[in-house]
Amino acid sequence: MVSVYIHIPFCEKKCNYCAFLSFCPSNAERKRYLSALIDEIERYDGDNVAKTIYFGGGTPSLLTTEELGTIFQKLRQKFEILSGAEITIEVNPNSISEEKVKFYREMGINRVSVGVQSLNNKTLKKIGRLHSKRDVKLALKTLSKYYDNISADLILGLENEKNVCHYAKKLLKWKVKHISAYMLEVHKNTPLFEAVNRGEYRPLSADGVTKSYEKLVKFLKKYHFFQYEVSNFAINGFESKHNLNYWSYGDYVGFGISAHSFLGGVRSANSSNLKGYYGGEKNCEKIDSKMEIEERIMLGLRSQVGVSKLALKKLGYDITLSETYRKLLKEGVIREDGDRFYLNEKFYKFADYHILNLIA
Ligand SMILES: C[S@@+](CC[C@H](N)C(=O)[O-])C[C@H]1O[C@@H](n2cnc3c(N)ncnc32)[C@H](O)[C@@H]1O
Ligand code: SF4
């Protein structure tokens, strides 16, 4: 069984902070890309039982119903999609309509992830978003007529930490059941990076970002959102199964430019330029046991999936013999439950530090 990822690299306009692989395509580029994507799915001959499907981007909601329908037709030809499979689409508030949302339901999409980022119109404008707070409200109103399973993305660090709980409260009122809260990353070669260098934009200090995060964690806990990963919060039963598969070290196959796959211990990445992608270029890497040990610890500790001691032992690493491990256990940073160990949620904000110590 695999999780399937489909990359739709189209955007109406690049946001000032975004370094994800996406571009504003001409009609010809759009056609060529979608045809290459369909061909790539057609050529696939690996595990064909799909337990989750995820349309990510870019902006998959820019696809017309016809384009999305063609991709689904190919997916259904190639994969046995398990009944009850989670099927997610990422949408931007300004590029959905009731007609599209109805079509998503018809196609079997049962989870929608909305890029909100902020609910402050000035901030949204500054970071180059094409939507306003009102657009978010209207989009969620339309979506909630058809969907229960709605997630929203927020970016922490764009503005004052006082606002974050206010935004979360609104999202809850608008029926969101899952929140992903990412800390702002200022990437080189983005307009945001240049604006910060010119002194025209001052993101929140690291201390401010930590405060925003702590406030959000506390607020969401009060409203019964379970923090099941460093950046992800959900009402019980609304966790992203697709992401849980990544963190559990499950197999996945990715289609589209720059998409990654992990099948039978081999990781591969499609080319991240169009010419290379169209030519079928990809990089493959066999994961050796040292890499697998590190990755299992990294992925498992950042989430409530945890890490199996037995799985590590089979790879030749008895973690119970590690002094750092025993120290973290004694200090309550890590807890054990049967075969698995977990990072306690209150240490999530230092997750990377503890993980690095553990795998050093
Ligand atoms: C791959 S993007 C696609 C989502 C969708 N296109 C949108 O913008 O609404 C997924 C999420 O990554 C987050 N993201 C993108 N760039 C980021 C950055 N520089 N720092 C923090 N979060 C970022 C945003 O929250 C965004 O919604
Ligand atoms: S954040 Fe989303 S809409 Fe903005 S450029 Fe990135 S992928 Fe496109």
Image: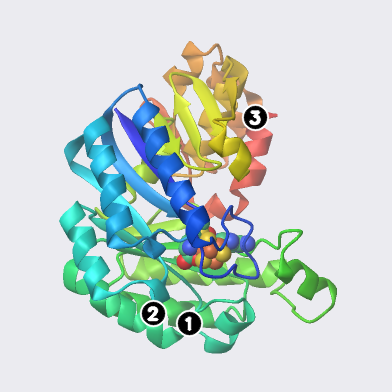
353 relative position to 263: left or right:
right
- Residue type, numbered disc 2: Val
Q: Which residue is identified by label 2?
A: 136
Quadrant occupied by the C terminus? top right
Q: Where does residue 53 sit, x and y in percent of width and height?
A: 32, 44
Q: In the image, what residue occupies the spot 51% across and 44% down?
A: 302
Label 3 and label 1: CA atoms lie apart by 39 Å
Q: Quadrant of residue 50?
A: top left
Work out whether residue 252 or residue 61 is closer to the camera in this orientation and state it.
61
- Residue type, numbered disc 3: Ile
Q: Which residue is identified by label 3?
A: 359
Q: Where does residue 80 sit, x and y in percent of width and height?
A: 20, 32
- Residue type, numbered disc 1: Leu
Q: Secondary structure at mark 1?
A: loop
Work out whether residue 81 or residue 265 is closer to the camera in this orientation and state it.
81
Most distant residue in the right direction:
198
